[in-house]
Image (cartoon, helix red, strand yellow):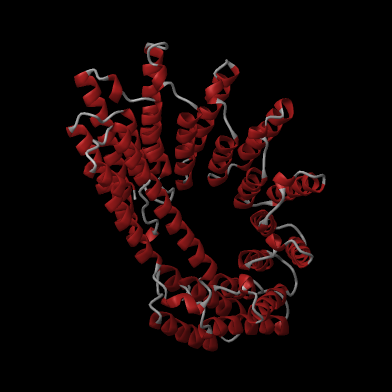
């Protein structure tokens, strides 16, 4: 529409100027946002419907992502053409380049772990394009001394944001974070050289928070130093703000990024330290931008769930109770959600505490009751049921595989009645098989019952028309045979049959072979 309006302007003898073309670039930037949101919505719908056989005929995630990339590539080419035309007309300015850098940084990339090298190359190419645009702007500014194209805070922030926006699952995250920090330091140096003359490049909360986010994403790869680096920059922001720099005040997003960084590197104590810091600062200032919310609490609980152990489970449960108490007192910002409860259940399952699995199932039952009373947002899903089944598998509860099987049967019955949110998936069946494999204690009858439960789950998964076995399925069932079959001859015979079935499904790997 904007392009058509420009054509009409020219037909009427009106000459487009920098404002006209910059407006067109902003329209392209908004189109990039729309295409990106549509792709994310499609991904969300595929996740919600992945267990529904009717969705199998729909385009795959890779096809949808390629379509998005093609559309975005066309928009990028159009934007580059407009910027080149503005340069030819000598009307390009800081806004033009900033918008172009922003457009380039909005390109989305596939995140499949099956093609990490390709993903990294594509991600780095988009950042290189953004860098090239930034340096083109810098070179022109230096060569011409034209203040209209001088890089400003927005220019730096757009490029730093380009590094920070790339998905954490794409390799090279630490290198991208370092490059983002280098740009931040460049901004600081330019501003310090001439605070009065270089106010336009003064780092702000976006500059620092984007670097924090980049290091937080890099921590996903187990880089402990990245989490500490994120914390270091957060502390720098706090010091600058307390020294009078209002524009760099850390906000909820900044603190949450650091919490997530420590959660990913298995440092829940540091994550809770950040949460406590937020609570203290909010209590002193009553600044809502520092008020911990559901995401902050849940991320901290998730950190304890990842660590496991008795103390971690106790801390996770205490944080949940704190959230529930605050919510019951009227604080709607800390209402526990399904992810919160799932994290607590996972922490309990990894605790090794007596009756931890029973407590996990009790939480599940309470959620069922609450959701039946109207709180549909707390209705349990497959992930929650899987967490409870896994808790039983890890426990020393007598008859734990019976409890696991009952939960599986409940899921099947409910999903057959239309509740697709708790339809069993491959992980569900594998968890029941695992519960059976870990039931090697007890007399002959107990062990035989456990074997039959594991066998039934194994067979049901192979008969399923909505999920399929994985290599882990065969690893776990081979453990069932090893731990529960009395006759060595029968065990070897069954192991051979299972291995042939595994080979038929092209799922043989080193883990499967090691169980033979």
Determine the residue positioned at 29% across, 49% down.
4
* Residue 101 appears in the figure: no
The answer to whether residue 112 is above or below residue 299 is below
* Residue 116 appears in the figure: yes
The answer to whether residue 67 is above or below residue 277 is below
Residue 448, image x, y percentages? 67, 84
Residue 227, image x, y percentages? 51, 37
Residue 495, image x, y percentages? 49, 83
Q: Quadrant of residue 408?
A: bottom right
Determine the residue positioned at 40% across, 54% down.
35
Viewer-proximal residue among 251 and 6: 6
Viewer-proximal residue among 36 and 128: 36
The answer to whether residue 231 is above or below residue 404 is above
Viewer-proximal residue among 270 and 46: 46
Determine the residue positioned at 59% across, 81% down.
457
Q: Image check: 202 left or right of 131?
A: right
Q: Quadrant of residue 139?
A: top left
Q: Furthest residue to the left?
A: 88
Q: Image check: 296 left or right of 261?
A: right
The answer to whether residue 388 is above or below residue 56 is above
Q: How many marks?
A: 0
Residue 249, image x, y percentages? 57, 26
Q: Image check: 56 left or right of 24?
A: right
């Amino acid at each position: 529409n904007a392009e058509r309006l420009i054509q009409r302007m020219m037909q009427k003898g009106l000459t487009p100027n920098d404002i006209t073309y910059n407006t067109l670039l902003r329209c392209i930037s908004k189109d990039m946002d729309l295409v990106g949101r549509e792709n994310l919505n499609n991904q969300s719908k595929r996740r919600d419907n992945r267990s529904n056989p009717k969705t199998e005929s729909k385009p795959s995630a890779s096809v949808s992502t390629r379509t998005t990339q093609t559309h975005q590539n066309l928009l990028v080419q159009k934007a580059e053409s407009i910027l080149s035309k503005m340069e030819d007309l000598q009307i390009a300015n800081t806004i033009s380049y900033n918008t172009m850098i922003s457009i380039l940084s909005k390109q989305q990339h596939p995140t499949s772990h099956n093609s990490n090298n390709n993903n990294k190359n594509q991600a780095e190419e988009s950042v290189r394009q953004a860098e090239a645009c930034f340096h083109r702007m810098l070179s022109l500014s230096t060569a011409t001394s034209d203040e209209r194209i001088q890089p400003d805070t927005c220019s730096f922030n757009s490029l730093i944001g380009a590094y920070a926006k790339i998905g954490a699952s794409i390799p090279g995250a630490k290198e991208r974070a370092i490059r983002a920090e280098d740009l931040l330091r460049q901004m600081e140096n330019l501003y310090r050289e001439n605070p009065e003359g270089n106010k336009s490049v003064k780092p702000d909360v976006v500059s620092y928070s984007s670097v924090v986010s980049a290091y937080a994403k890099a921590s996903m790869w187990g880089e402990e130093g990245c989490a500490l680096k994120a914390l270091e920059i957060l502390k720098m922001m706090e010091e600058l703000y307390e020294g009078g720099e209002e524009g760099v005040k850390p906000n909820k997003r900044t603190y949450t990024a650091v919490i997530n960084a420590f959660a990913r590197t298995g440092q829940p104590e540091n994550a809770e330290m950040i949460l406590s810091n937020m609570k203290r600062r909010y209590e002193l200032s009553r600044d809502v931008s520092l008020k911990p919310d559901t995401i902050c609490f849940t991320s901290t609980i998730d950190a304890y769930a990842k660590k496991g152990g008795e103390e971690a489970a106790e801390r996770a449960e205490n944080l949940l109770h704190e959230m529930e108490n605050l919510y019951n007192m009227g604080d709607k910002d800390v209402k526990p959600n399904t992810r919160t409860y799932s994290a607590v259940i996972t922490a309990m399952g990894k605790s090794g505490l007596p009756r931890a699995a029973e407590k996990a199932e009790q939480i599940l039952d309470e959620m069922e009751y609450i959701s039946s009373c109207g709180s549909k947002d707390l209705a349990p899903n497959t992930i929650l049921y899987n967490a409870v089944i896994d808790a039983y598998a890890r426990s020393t509860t007598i008859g734990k595989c019976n409890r696991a099987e009952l939960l599986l049967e409940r899921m099947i019955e409910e999903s057959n009645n239309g509740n697709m949110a708790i339809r069993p998936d491959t992980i569900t069946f594998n968890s029941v098989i695992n519960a059976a494999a870990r039931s090697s204690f007890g007399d002959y009858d107990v062990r035989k019952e456990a074997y039959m439960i594991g066998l039934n789950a194994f067979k049901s998964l192979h008969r399923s028309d909505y999920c399929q076995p994985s290599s882990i399925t065969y690893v776990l069932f081979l453990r069932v045979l090893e731990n529960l079959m009395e006759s060595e001859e029968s065990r070897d015979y069954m192991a051979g049959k299972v291995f042939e079935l595994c080979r038929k499904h092209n799922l043989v790997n080193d883990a499967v072979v090691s169980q033979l």
